[in-house]
Image (spheres, rainbow, N blue to C red):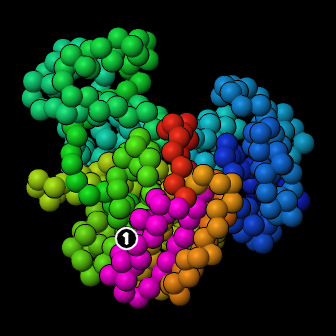
Amino acid sequence: MTNEQSKTGGIERILCIASSEKGHDFLRQCAEMGMRPTLLTLDTLKDAAWPRDAVEDVVTMPSGLNREQILNTVSWMARGRRYDRIVALDEFDLETAAAIREHMRIPGMGITTAAYYRDKLAMRMSARESGFQVPEFCRVLNYDELRDYMARVPAPWLLKPRLEASALGIRRIEDSEQLWRTLDELGDMQSHYLLEQFVPGDIFHVDSIVSECDVLFSVVHQYGRPPMESMREGGVFTSRTVDRGSRDWMELTALNAGLAPSLGMVRGVTHTEYIRGHADGRYYFQKIAAGMGGASIADLVEAASGVNLWRQWARLEVAYLRGETYVPPDSFESYAGSVLCLAQTAEPDTDSFHAPEIVVRMKKRHHAGLIVRSQEPERVKQLLEEYSGEFARRFLASMPPQEKPMA
């Protein structure tokens, strides 16, 4: 029994914060390992399909609370229960969880390190200082800096909110006049943005397990269309496992092995995106998240490798709490691909898609989605090309860009 356990009579508790419905397997894994998870979520998600049998309590709060109000809520909860660990299941809650840890002096990622996984300016500056290739960027703060940047770096540029996830809120800027007009519109909020060179290229994501500053597992996938296009213009989202013998697989795996530890990640899971530039073939760092990628990427990784990242994340947290050594899971080497879109009907019927390679049929209201798996990467590519066209014809619905990415 650890010292922490002795103070709580052997009861170990973990507080999980989620502002969207996700992390069911994380909660289940914690419960299976003898932990007592408490879920803190929003009032609007009170009746969501949480795994009630796996959690000790579900506490809800109104949306729109500021960090101080959430901290007061958790401090009130802690009067009756001692929490050994705090985990943000949603990327949007990462900074809040870090602030709670620091206030309650609970081990884990603090506010400064969390910024490298939420603030696009902070993560770019740190990645560049560590020697990674990053598109030319500039903070939106000093106008002389901006004028110098625009004189050096040819348009178009991307104006990106520093703290939003995925491609939310990104604007393409074609010239300096458009930038100044946009900054006028933003007013006092403009310093919460950065300006970045637009680098046309193919977008990859690498999803990893990090333990004691070492990347113990990772898998590389390539998006069919850049997420920014899918979110801004609508359409069908696809991603597929990269050929494991390819240059993309080997170089991105090597790059990723150094990135997360250089940004301060000690243990956890990461979702990192890279651009392979069309003009020069070089790999550019785009973003990193200390958590799970959206659009059912965790299910895609599991189909390609047999590794459930949600469950492994829980195992990491529990192992560290108990002073044990985390042992990475066994995995296999296969190829998987996902096809996903917003659907016009609440429960779209995908039963007419019947290829034997289909391993997951996604169940989410107003979404149509499939995951396929094969030992041949070309077969996965062929199915995604076929199914993405059919999804667009049968199911696709369009709507304004979401405030949060697809889970």
Q: What is the number of callouts on the image?
A: 1
Most extreme residue toward the front is 393
Kindly report the secondary structure that dominates the magenta region of the rendered protein.
helix
Task: Please report the bounds of the magenta region as a residue range.
Answer: 367-394
Residue occupied by mark 1: 385
Q: Which residue lies at the image location 62% right of the left edge and 37% below the top edge?
A: 96
Q: Which residue lies at the image location 30% right of the left edge and 14% below the top edge?
A: 181
Category of crowding for the residue at label 1, using alpha-carbon neighbours closer than 10 angstroms: few (below 14), some (14–19), many (at least 20): some
**Which quarter shows the N terminus?**
bottom right
**Which percent across, then down, holds residue 237?**
44, 58
Residue 390 is a magenta residue: yes
**Which percent across, then down, holds residue 229?**
36, 46
Q: Which residue lies at the image location 56% right of the left edge and 65% below the top edge?
A: 369
Q: Which residue lies at the image location 55% right of the left edge and 36% below the top edge?
A: 403
Give the quarter of the image for residue 93.
top right
Residue 192, placed above or below residue 276:
above
Give the quarter of the image for residue 324.
bottom right
Q: SS class of the residue under badge 1?
A: helix
Residue 241, placed above or below residue 404:
below
For the residue marked with disc 1, what is the amino acid? Glu
In the drawing, does residue 21 fall left or right of residue 308? right
**Which percent across, then down, holds residue 179?**
26, 20
Residue 251, placed above or below residue 19:
below
**Which percent across, then down, holds residue 220?**
37, 69
